[in-house]
Image (spheres, rainbow, N blue to C red):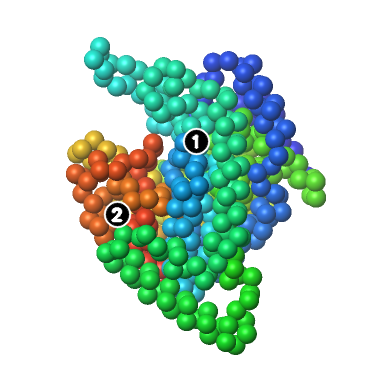
Amino acid sequence: MSTIPSLEELHALGAAQQPNYPDPDALAKVVGKLRSVPPLVFAGECDELTDKIAAVTRGEAFILQGGDCAETLEGATADNVRAKLRVLLQMAVVLTYASSVPVVKIGRLAGQYAKPRSKDTETRVGPEGPVTLPAYRGDAVNGFDFTPESRMPDPQRLLDVYHASASTLNLARAFVTGGYADLRQVHTWNQDFIKDSPFASRYEALAGEIDRAMAFMQAIGVADADEFHRADFASSHEALVLEYEHALTRIDSRTEEPYDVSGHFVWIGERTRQLSGAHVELLSRIKNPIGVKLGPTTSPDDAIALASKLNPANSPGRLTFITRFGASKIRDGLPPIIEKVTAEGLQVAWITDPMHGNTFEASSGYKTRSFDDVLDEVQGFFDVHRSLGTWPGGLHVELTGDNVTECVGGGEQLSDADLATRYESVCDPRLNRVQSLEMAFLVADMLRKA
Ligand code: PEP
Ligand code: CO
């Protein structure tokens, strides 16, 4: 049985990327309250997800993980949640149908509210000269508005995040089990898509094929399988703010083991994966399926050490490595890591995050990513796995169900100049609905060949 260190013990290990709360008493009150709120997910659901990821580790399934870079409290609306789910369901159906591989669907939602930042502060030049304030660390920590009040870390926000996550997850669960995700709705998900988009018509054609396949199955008497009427869907986020994740780590009554019940799957970010640091320690103790982001500075030995610490029993499904090298680095950087992990016989699922190594500032000043770079990293990921005989297990993307203009390129050929039209992300640029669907078709082709 695993035990959980206290918050104080965790902080003593060194915790990167934590907010500086001005009032420790207020923080302690919030943590006390969070310790008593009901869990957002059940331990048994986490175990089911572990089993599904174990199939990915064996090369029998593929993960689609996606959602906002940073959720916002204001954005926790029915329309937003539905739009994100809809694009994820569309992508999953494209991937499954085109490749005949089961797709494990995981949202970056219902908890993705805290952000690591490269700098602690942000400086903007105002009418009276430069002003420096704490950096925005996500709605879990402080406000996006550039004022001293808004940028001050406020622990109450952790409670707001819990409640927003509860309502988001409640709605997501209702959608996926209550009929919206029924395969007979494949056409409905495509409604009000940009009508002249070639990907909308390509999707429509695929949906027609699914209709025929369903009619065939109905004719032979198997159309009532549960899988046709509901989808499996899991939540995930970066486990970053220790107070929140620690307060929501509970002992499961069935197994007496600790689970972080703030989400089904939690991951450790590129900036908090120090082997002896607080995040690795906490996540080494919980029983959820977990991920670790691996960037271009990762050595093969780092990966081995992380796997030994986080998955000492070497159980398949427990650990996923989410690689985010950048398009120009993946083909050289990834092979030595996979080779060593494979040679050691370590059971991990490999996912590509083609977003975080490919961010740049456009001439217009917006933080953006080029669709071609994103696609090139995914292609590199598939190429590397193919050459090593390992399984490219999944795709992790920042996306939204709306027609935002945050990433350049793609079938709509968004340019630098278009970014200003509808740039809504409070953090990193996301694929919009058309770009996401296009990505799904392109990845489905790669998957079929894998
Ligand atoms: C993220 O996923 O939003 C993120 C910050 O990623 P990384 O830790 O890989 O930089
Ligand atoms: Co991001």
In the rendered view, does 442 fall on the left or right side of 12? left
Amino acid at dot 1: Leu
In the rendered view, does 130 fall on the left or right side of 276? left
State the quadrant of the N terminus: top right
State the quadrant of the C terminus: bottom left
User: Which residue is under mark 2?
Assistant: 371
Q: Quadrant of residue 240?
A: top right
Amino acid at dot 2: Phe
Q: Is residue 268 visible?
A: no
Assess disc 2: are there few (<14), some (14-19) or many (≥20) residues with their C-alpha within 10 Å of its C-alpha.
many
Helix, strand or loop at mark 1 = loop
Q: Is residue 345 above or below residue 4?
A: below
Checking the image for residue 73, the label placed there is: 1
Checking the image for residue 369, the label placed there is: none
Q: Quadrant of residue 26?
A: top right
Quote the CA–CA distance across marks 2 and 1. Answer: 28 Å
Identity of the residue drawn at 39% across and 31% down: 118
Percent position of residue 185, x then y:
50, 67
Percent position of residue 370, x then y:
28, 50
In the rendered view, does 446 fall on the left or right side of 152? left
Percent position of residue 98, x then y:
43, 73
Percent position of residue 65, x then y:
49, 54
- Residue extending furthest toward the bottom: 220
Disc 2, disc 1: CB below 8 Å? no
Q: Is residue 230 visible?
A: yes
Q: Quadrant of residue 344?
A: bottom right
Identity of the residue drawn at 53% across and 79% down: 214
Name the quarter showing ligand 2: top left
Q: Is residue 420 above or below residue 61?
A: above
Identity of the residue drawn at 35% across and 18% down: 132
- Which residue is more in the foreground, 307 or 382? 382
